[in-house]
Image (cartoon, grey):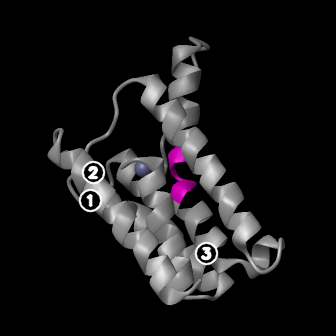
Amino acid sequence: MYVFTHLCVGAFLGAAWPNPVGAAVAGFASHGLLDAVPHHDYQTPIPAIIDAGFSISALWVLRKMGATSRLTLNPVLIGGLLAALPDLEVGISFTLDKLGQGHKLPLIYPSHSGLSPHRRLPLPQGFWLQIAIMATSILGIYWLGA
Ligand SMILES: [Zn+2]
């Protein structure tokens, strides 16, 4: 799934379970569960860079929206960050591979390593499904008043 989709769901889980440790665990676990839902993944670097930039911006906004700037007291930010974090290994692995340094980073997160399902859904359904997940998550955060 797109990084931003993972981030939205993780942030929602942090809003629903406003406990830093609970938000971290729920966010991190949600990544694998979401990857099992059939979805579209981009195949070229430009959409990935845009997605990463958008996600980093969203994390910054979540940090600013928190009652405190302390990460440990912002479960919405923690959930979003931990939900998006597993895709960092994909980005690092892809970058090292493209740089031709001969480094092939082994992917360890279960839905990236093949240990758990990572299902595909072509465009446009695979895109619109993620838009619906993002919108539902963002509305859920507002509904919870986080
Ligand atoms: Zn992933």
Name the secondary structure under disc 1: helix
Cβ of disc 2 within 8 Å of ligand 1? yes
- The image shows residue 75, relative to residue 53, as above or below, that is below
Q: Amino acid at mark 2?
A: His
Q: CA distance from mark 1 to mark 2?
A: 5 Å
**In the drawing, what numbered circle is on residue 90?**
none
Question: Of tags 3 and 1, which is closer to the observer?
Answer: 3
State the residue position of label 2. 118
Q: Amino acid at mark 3?
A: Val
Q: Main secondary structure of the magenta part?
A: helix
Position of the C terminus by quadrant? bottom right
Name the secondary structure under disc 2: loop
- The image shows residue 79, relative to residue 90, as above or below, that is below
Q: Amino acid at mark 1?
A: Ala
Question: How would you rate the neighbour count of disc 3 (Cα within 10 Å): few for under 14, some for 14-19, many for 20 or more?
Answer: many
Does the CB distance between marks 1 and 2 fall below 8 Å? yes
State the residue position of label 1. 36
Give the magenta-colored segment's residue range: 84-89
First in sequence, mark 3 or 1: give its number. Answer: 1
In the rendered structure, the answer to whether residue 146 lies left or right of residue 126 reads right
**In the drawing, what numbered circle is on residue 76?**
3
Does the CB distance between marks 3 and 1 fall below 8 Å? no
In the rendered structure, the answer to whether residue 131 lies left or right of residue 121 reads right
First in sequence, mark 1 or 2: give its number. Answer: 1
| Residue 106 appears in the rendering | no
**Residue at the farthest top position:** 100
